[in-house]
Image (cartoon, grey):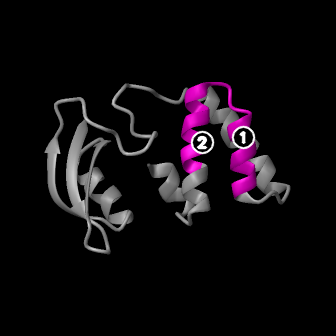
Amino acid sequence: MLFTYKATNKDGKTVTGTVEAASKQVLLTLLHRQGLHPLVIEVSKGGGKSLGKLFSTQSKKVKLNDLVVFTRQLSTMISAGVPLARSMSALQADANTPYMSEVLAGITKDIESGIPLGDAFAK
């Protein structure tokens, strides 16, 4: 489902956006993890801006095969001692599809800004 929300951040500033989430509860959890306090959440009827490039209004998905290859390569790089941010950047540059590269770019940016890996993947 596509949701439109209005929330406040920890500085008290109002933030609005459109996010695709499985349910309203999943969206609430996602917003809370980002330090946002929702004021209004509505089911979107389409259109509007998306939050970052990861939350597209189109039905883009990462293919299972791409995910398997990515997971194996990331595991190998981490086991070899390559730093996480550098591993993600290398895998982004080596992605098979433009959409996979776009997704990995967003995750890499989140990791470099200090968001935990699990939270970056959850987005």
Q: Which residues are magenta?
A: 85-107
Q: Are marks 1 and 2 in contact (CB under 8 Å)?
A: yes
Q: Main secondary structure of the magenta part?
A: helix
- Kindly report the distance in space between the C-alpha atoms of the residues bearing marks 1 and 2: 8 Å
Mark 2 Cα shell of 10 Å, populated few (<14), some (14-19), many (≥20): many
Q: Quadrant of residue 97?
A: top right
Q: Amino acid at mark 2?
A: Leu
Q: Residue furthest bottom?
A: 11
Left/right placement of residue 1 relative to residue 87 reads left
Q: Amino acid at mark 1?
A: Leu
Give the mark, 1 or 2, whose residue is nearer the N terminus: 1
For label 1, the residue is 91
Mark 1 Cα shell of 10 Å, populated few (<14), some (14-19), many (≥20): many
SS at mark 1 in the image? helix
For label 2, the residue is 104
Front in this rendered view, residue 46 or 84 = 46
Picture quarter with the N terminus: top left
Whether residue 65 is in magenta: the answer is no
* Image location of residue 3, percent across then percent down: 22, 42
Q: Residue at x 52, y 57 (%)?
A: 118
